[in-house]
Amino acid sequence: MTTASAPGKIILFGEHAVVSGTAAIGGAIDLRAAVHVTDEPGRVLITTEDLALQGFSFDMTAGHIQSARAAHATRYISAVLRELDARDMQVSIKSSLPPAAGLGSSACIVVATVAAVSRHQGHNLSKKDIAEVSYRLEKTVQNGLGSPMDTALATYGGYLQISKDIQPLDLPPLNMIVGYTGIPHDTRSEVEKVQNLRKRYPDLVDPIFQAIGAISQNAIPLIKEGNAAETGELMNINHGLLASLGVSSRELEELVYAARGAGGALGAKLTGAGGGGCMIALPGRSGPEALLVALRQARAAAFQVKVGCEGVRLEEKR
Ligand code: MEV
């Protein structure tokens, strides 16, 4: 058996503006997807205990007819297995990340699958190879859309600054609270919405993108120094700018205000594409517990994450 695991992610600052080339900061979190590969002569079988697909099984051996739903549910993993010409194996996926929540669940499944399957086949891919193959595959499944942020974070872990290129950032671990609205989001339509707004109002939207990029740049030394109060302030400004681009929602706003009010957060913002999905909050003097309670009272699924965690990890072949 060969096993690999890879982390999910949050975007701390800079989403949407990054699509047009300004800086964004992302961090890997301590929720992971694990992929186990075992020998299965004559077949290629995918099984998953993914949160949304409890006990799901899919046989992609040539000639085996599957339902469209099964093919859709396993599209990321099937893409990896086709790319790597997988044969005679069972691939089991177990993920602790909610899917379609903006926490990078598809990217970490792709990265862990590339790492586990390639090692099981006897290859020794570098992290650079894993990140490149994974980004290309995720982008193909998403019809050409997506930045390399999610797959790079799932591969390298830690923190990354993404603008025209990807650079690791040396920042200390952070404890954040994530509030999930329970509403699946659609990255593609949110990105298109913002890019259309930009086409119609370039003189308004471009300065907003510039301001968002400047927030990311300003945040780096603040996180490094452990200046939580000002990091939180920048989260609040970033959220306001994202709302001005139309990617917040009533549900996200309720969680952001619950976090800042009863939750005593130093800062709160949506994370990822918006429209649904998740928000993040930085605990204040009243601590993480008060924040979790406030978000749950506002009907979120809320949990604490550590940011800056390890990237893809391979367990040795047994
Ligand atoms: C989505 O997680 C982040 C966006 O900036 C899109 C992207 O960078 O691909 C909205």
Image (cartoon, rainbow, N blue to C red):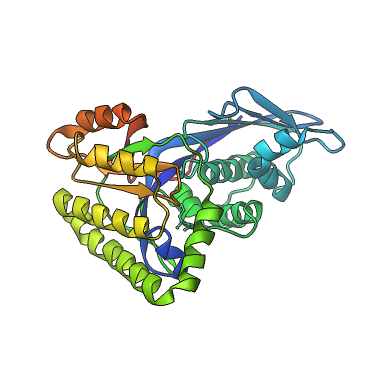
Is residue 126 in sight in this rendering?
A: no
State left or right for residue 214 relative to residue 188. left
317 or 89: which is nearer to us? 89
Q: Which quadrant does the C terminus fall into?
A: top right
State left or right for residue 291 relative to residue 274. left
Q: Position of residue 294 (x, y in %)?
A: 25, 30
Q: Position of residue 185 (x, y in %)?
A: 50, 44
The residue most toward the top is 55
Q: Is residue 192 above or below residue 296?
A: below
User: In which image quadrant can residue 65 be found?
Assistant: top right
Is residue 16 in sight in this rendering?
A: yes
Q: Position of residue 142 (x, y in %)?
A: 62, 53
Q: Is residue 303 above or below residue 7?
A: above
Residue located at (29% from left, 27% from top): 297
Residue located at (65% from left, 41% from top): 77
Residue located at (57% from left, 55% from top): 135
User: In which image quadrant can residue 295 be found?
Assistant: top left
Residue located at (69% from left, 26% from top): 57
State left or right for residue 236 relative to residue 199. left
Q: Which quadrant does the N terminus fall into?
A: top right
Q: Is residue 51 above or below residue 223?
A: above
Q: Position of residue 235 (x, y in %)?
A: 26, 53
State left or right for residue 261 relative to residue 96. left
- Number of disc labels: 0
Q: Is residue 51 above or below residue 239?
A: above
The residue most toward the right is 63
The residue most toward the bottom is 203
